[in-house]
Amino acid sequence: MSSEELDILTQKGIDAAEKGYFHSAQVFLSQVAEQRNSPELQTYLAYCLAKGQGRMHSAAKICRESIKREPGNSLHYLILGRVLLMAGEKGKAITAFRQGLKTSPNQKIITELKKLGLRKPAVLKNLKRNHPLNRVLGRVFSTIGFR
């Protein structure tokens, strides 16, 4: 295949993955992976692996390897964060998203973070967030409209 055809297949695979057609995306990207082996391609294949087959651990490992190969690309952090969210590791996902934003601005990461929502700061900053006094005061202040 020519380089142009590989680029078209790569774009079709990425578009299919973003739209949720993971089996189709995996087929397109696998065809390209036979000819090329780029970190971006491997990351999207890992995303398809996680979404399509539920293999979160393997997908996260592939994403981390892609980050080592290309640390300045925020796309890897985006996909890693998505995979970690699917695995139920919200804290690690948020960390991955934030690291991605530090490397380069990415609107998709910002969208993912907005979906997760932001927590309001603790009422009493000297106490831990889950301290009973912070929890009660937070509810009271929210009820009366101070938060």
Image: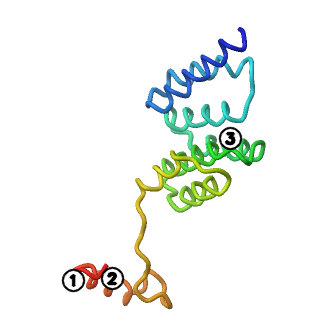
Disc assigned to residue 62:
3
Foreground tag (1 vs 2): 1
What residue is rendered at 37% in x and 90% in y?
133
Quadrant assignment for the N terminus:
top right
Disc assigned to residue 144:
1
* Kind of residue at badge 1: Ile
**Tag 2, which secondary structure?**
helix
Q: Which residue is mark 2?
A: 138
* Kind of residue at badge 3: Ile
Q: Is residue 13 left or right of residue 120?
A: right
Foreground tag (3 vs 2): 2
Pointer 1 local density, CA inside 10 Å: few below 14, some 14–19, many at least 20 = few
Q: Position of residue 85 (x, y in %)?
A: 49, 51
Quadrant assignment for the C terminus:
bottom left
Q: Quadrant of residue 114?
A: bottom left
What residue is rendered at 48% in x and 89% in y?
127
Foreground tag (1 vs 3): 1
* CA–CA distance in space, label 3 to label 2: 41 Å
Disc assigned to residue 50:
none
Q: Position of residue 54 (x, y in %)?
A: 51, 38
* CA–CA distance in space, label 1 to label 3: 48 Å
Q: Position of residue 124 (x, y in %)?
A: 43, 89
Residue 76, compared with residue 21, is above or below; it is below
- Tell me whether the residue at label 3 lies in contact with that at label 2, contact meaning CB atoms closer than 8 angstroms: no
Residue 85, compared with residue 40, is above or below; it is below
Q: Position of residue 95 (x, y in %)?
A: 59, 60
Q: Is residue 113 left or right of residue 106?
A: left
* Kind of residue at badge 2: Gly
Mark before the other along the chain sequence, 1 or 2: 2
- Tell me whether the residue at label 1 lies in contact with that at label 3, contact meaning CB atoms closer than 8 angstroms: no
